[in-house]
Image (cartoon, grey):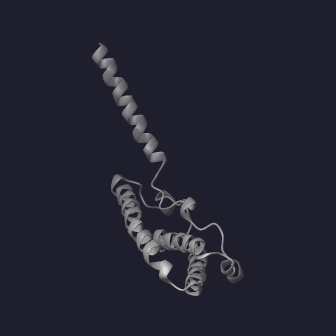
Amino acid sequence: MKKLILLLLLISSLSTLTAQSRKNPAILYKADKLVSRFHTIDELQDLNKGDLIKLYLERTREIFIVIPYLSLTNKPGTSLQDLGIQADSDHVKVVEKNIEIADRAFEYTENTIKKLVPYSDTDDIIWSILYFEEVIKKMRLGR
């Protein structure tokens, strides 16, 4: 009898976990990884190279994260279900794997930027940041 009760409790727990995972479908990307503020050329010219490189990295990261999903959505927090895509295990795995691989790949990109961009002329970094910000604005506007 105890085994039967334990088995029923185990099955009940597993079904609850499965139901909860269905309520929380894969999110393509979250707003916390996106740029929160854009800058003017005057603001950028007042910053030192180290601060400019941080901004450069933030903008590169947003572009890196959003581009794979741009044809699906340009809104952070969008889930597969929001797009009408079934949040089955295959689709969820694809999204989760992409997030994992993108995070790992961006570590290398970040390392490259930190090692090489300091050798750039400050004006070139500023112009790159302004360019990235224009790209990000266009991505956020959509069509």
Report which quarter residue 41 is drawn in.
Answer: bottom right
> Which residue reaches farthest right?
42
Residue 54 at x, y = what percent? 55, 70
Count of picture labels: 0
Report which quarter residue 86 is drawn in.
Answer: bottom left
Residue 1 at x, y = what percent? 29, 13
Q: Residue at x 44, y 46 (%)?
A: 22
Position above or below: 50 against 76: below
Give 12 or 116, whichever is nearer the viewer.
116
Q: Position of 120 compared to 127: left or right? A: left
Q: Position of 48 compared to 95: left or right? A: right
Q: Residue at x 47, y 68 (%)?
A: 65
| Quadrant placement of the C terminus | bottom right
Q: Residue at x 58, y 80 (%)?
A: 129
Give 134 or 24, whichever is nearer the viewer.
134
Position above or below: 20 against 8: below
Q: Residue at x 35, y 59 (%)?
A: 97
Report which quarter residue 47 is drawn in.
Answer: bottom right
Residue 106 at x, y = what percent? 42, 67
Give 33 or 112, whichever is nearer the viewer.
112
Residue 91 at x, y = what percent? 37, 58
Q: Position of 76 compared to 20: left or right? A: right
